[in-house]
Structure formats: structure tokens, C-alpha cells
Image: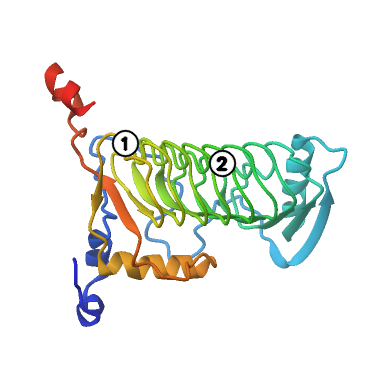
Amino acid sequence: MAGVSDIELKAMTQEERVKALGMTTEQLTGKSMHIEFDPEATERFEYPWAPVVDFNKRTEVDCDGLTPQEVNSKIRDLMAEGYGTVVLQNPRGMHSIGVGILSKLNLIIEGSTGYFSAGLIDGPNVRITGRVGWSCAENMMAGTVLIEKNAGSTFGAAIRGGDLVCHGSVGSRTGIDQKGGTILVGGDTGALTGFMMQRGRMVICGNAGKNLGDSMYDGTIYIGGEIRSLGVDAVEAEVTSLDKEWLTRKLTQYGLMPEKGVDHFKKIVAGKQLWNYDNLEPNEKKLIL
């Protein structure tokens, strides 16, 4: 797709653009899947029991003296009362808050949090004004999570959808086992970022540590800085016009666009030499590893 003109881009169907960006769909033949939503529905892609909230109805919760369980219970109770914007004050590094929210909500956390913040969510928009510990937004399904400062290790572990954004730098194993969605980092990332990545896209505006994309199965990683080293089966690919268009739109959306634009970004994908790993002879496995 290198050198695709604007006219050709406009002529492409949505399916063609998706395939050109590497966002293909795998048919899981023989797999069973519990269907939560009707794919033919035209509106209200929400859980049937999700509370109806008003984003203009706002309230604050002082976390001082409360346990994480009490804070999370208060959030659920307020949503049941129709509050669509909840502000958590004085979190003071509290662990596991803002978790398990499975419907629409504006959640603002004023301060820093500990590990597993905003994990297991499906739909809310979360903004944390401070730092976060490891495994922020773990198993996120949909929505947005924005961190204004730095984040710990395993940032976005096993996320499946939504946008996870950190304006600062993050620790090691960012996006480990990522299965979808988008992770954006304004600063640097640590070692083994993208380890065992399966789907989705990741954008690192700064530098990456050792073993970037190690054992990644699929997905795409964009790096704006230097790469300490690539991991097993991670290879550099050509950055296409579609890639640059998407990067420009996404980075601008979250205020992360570098002054020099996106032309300097590198694109890392899976070499796919491990796809049939179990069928290789022992001597072939040694060559790969």
C-alpha cells in the first residue's frame, strides 16, 4: 500500500482499508461464543441491565478513610441513581479502584492510583490526573482510559478494545497479551513491550526497551524513538500512507502529535515464523529461539 494517493484512498471500501492496515478478522471455526448483543441491532449496544445515566449529573466522592471495595460500591450506587460523571478525590495511590464498570460513565480520578486501576471495564471514559501502578486497564473491553502522568509495568495487559492512553512513560511488558484495542504512550516504554501480542495496535512516541514485540502473533506496533532490540519473530515493516493517516488522526485526538509529525515512526509486526511452532523440528526451533 506504499504510495497510495488520496484519490485511491477515497475509492477504497471500509473493508479494503481495514485489510490494508492489517486489521483482519480470524474465523474461529468450531469455537463456541456467548453472544451478549444482537449484531443486527442499530442502537443501544449496551448490557440490558446497564443503568441509564446523565453525564451532566455530577458528584464527588472523597476516598479518604474508604477501602477500595467501598469506593467501587459507591460508584455503582451513584450510577444506579443516574449520575453520569463521578469524581474521585484523594485516591492516595489506592489499588483496584474504578474496576468492573460495564456501562457508560465519566470517571475522573484526581490524583494517583495503585495497581489494577480501571481494570475489567467495558464502556466508561476514565481520566486519571496523576500516576498509576502496574496493570492499569487490564482486560479492558471498551471505552477510554487516559493517564496524565506515568504508568507502571504491564500497562494494558490483555486489553481487547477501547483506547488506553498515557501521556508520560510506562514500564516493561506494556500491552502483554494484547488482544485488541489501541494503546498510546507519549513517552518511553520498557522491556518486552508487546510480548505475545495477538491483535490491536500500539503507538510509542518515545523509545522502546529490549525485546520489543517478542513472540507477537499479530497486531502492529509503531515506534517514534529508538528501539533497544527486537524480540523473537518481530520484524520491521513498511509504514504506508494509511498508517500515517491513522497515526496523525489518533495522536492528534489525544494531544500526542510530535512536533516533527509521524514520518519518522517505525512499524513493527510479527514475522509469523512462530505460527506453526509446534510443527517444527527440534533443530528448527533452536534456529528461531
Residue 160, position as x, y percentages in the image: 44, 46
Residue at the extreme top of the image, as rendered: 282
Q: Nearer the viewer, residue 123 or 243?
A: 243
Q: Is residue 225 above or below residue 192?
A: below
Please tell me which residue is depicted at 57% across the width and 46% down the height of the picture: 121
Depth check, front residue: 142 or 178: 178
Tag 2: residue type? Leu
Around disc 2, counting alpha carbons within 10 Å, would you say few (fewer than 14), some (14 to 19), or many (20 or more)? Answer: some
Q: Quadrant of the C terminus?
A: top left
Left of 229 or right of it: where is 20? left
Horizontal side of residue 204 vs 7, given as left or right: right
As helix, strand or loop, the secondary structure at mark 1 comes to: loop
Q: Quadrant of residue 113?
A: top right
Residue 231 seen = yes
Relative to 193, residue 11 above or below: below
Q: Is residue 80 left or right of residue 210?
A: right
Residue matched to label 1: 231
Residue 281 seen in the current view: no
Q: Amino acid at mark 1?
A: Gly
Where is the N terminus found, in terms of image quarters? bottom left
Residue 230 picture location, percent across and down: 31, 40
Q: Work out how far the residue at label 2 is from the one at label 1, CA to CA, in angstroms.
A: 28 Å
Q: Position of residue 226 (x, y in %)?
A: 39, 50
Horizontal and vertical percent position of residue 141: 49, 47
Residue 120: image tag:
2
The residue sitting at 42% across, 62% down in the picture is: 41
Q: Secondary structure at mark 2?
A: loop
